Amino acid sequence: MPALPFTLRQLEVFAHLAASGSFRATADELGISQASVSNQIKTLEEQLGRRLLNRKPGQRPILTAVGQAFYDDMGDFERAAHKLAGYRRVASLEAGPVRYRLLVGQGNFDNYVRPQLDRFLAEHPMLDLSFNTQPPSHELMGTISTGQYDFALINRPVDLPPEPQHEKLARVQGGIYAHRRLVEGEVLPLDPAQVSAMPFVLPPAGSKQEREKLITLANHDVRPVKVVCHTQYYDVMAAMLERGVAVASLTDAIFPPSMRENVILILPMVDWDLEFYRKPGLTHPSADMIDDFLKSCMLDNPDYPALRIY
């Protein structure tokens, strides 16, 4: 293997500096001096023989074109490094299984996590993972802060106050979806009054999820007058949309790729952020493996319909 013109520490310092645009913030985050940050960047540039940052006294450092390309390519390097780190021996079967509780949104689990889960568990037989895959609700999300779950991978509306312990991974589109034949000949997006008159599928009648959904719809002037079905299962909702018998307020991440040609957005509403939670204090190496696995299921899947990756 050829000698690399950088060290992992130099890459770490550069990544923090590129993200923050501040020598002081980078030094604080890494617990080193600003002089050390500067020296690490200077040495990295000398070893590469390329300038990565334009620096002027009193101004924030700005990535050069080469620096931006280098920073973008670091994502591939980091993902490869995490995969290689996954070969580290974590625990023996004789030591007993390592148990974790996970909260994953139903659509995220069914479409992106479950298809990869068998291989992951076969490669790591010491792990015992218990999943809760209920549809999201404010009440369910609130249980994350109580420490009931070790990990969570959920979608939250972007207009909700941020959760300080959550890491935003990506943003997906949210709104009211329908089969294209229900709106054939109409100009999209539809007017809220038109949408209100269409047949709806909603969460279980009288449930907290239904009340939250109706409030969200009302905030966008949509008030369903005809409800053809109540169900807690998002795959059932998606199937009804595919059959063209109802419309529903969902995110496009709910739909399998095979549905996306015919199930279309008819009224945009609030977009949703894919958020990740890891319980503070989880330092066992197996926790890093689960962290990488959950994120890769979503962000490394070309079918995941992200509007943006954070």
Image (cartoon, rainbow, N blue to C red):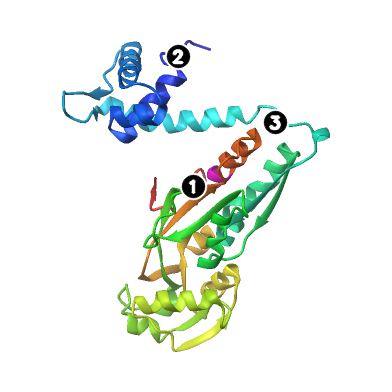
Query: Which percent across, then down, holds residue 120?
Result: 67, 41
Question: Which callout, 1 or 3, points to the residue nearer the camera?
Answer: 3
Q: In this orientation, does residue 137 appear?
A: no
Q: Which element carries disc 1, helix, strand or loop?
A: loop
Residue at the disc numbered 2: 4
* Above or below 296: residue 206: below
Specify the amino acid type for callout 1. Answer: Pro
Q: For the residues marked 3 and 2, what is the alpha-carbon distance in whole angstroms?
A: 28 Å
Q: Is residue 57 above or below residue 103?
A: above
Q: Is residue 278 left or right of residue 225?
A: right
Q: Is residue 38 magenta?
A: no
Question: What secondary structure is found at the residue carrying circle 3?
Answer: loop
Q: Is residue 301 left or right of residue 93?
A: left
Mark 1 or mark 2: which comes first in sequence? Answer: 2
**Element class at badge 2:** loop
Q: Label 2 sits on what residue type?
A: Leu
Residue at 54% across, 52% down:
153
The magenta-colored residue range is 294-298
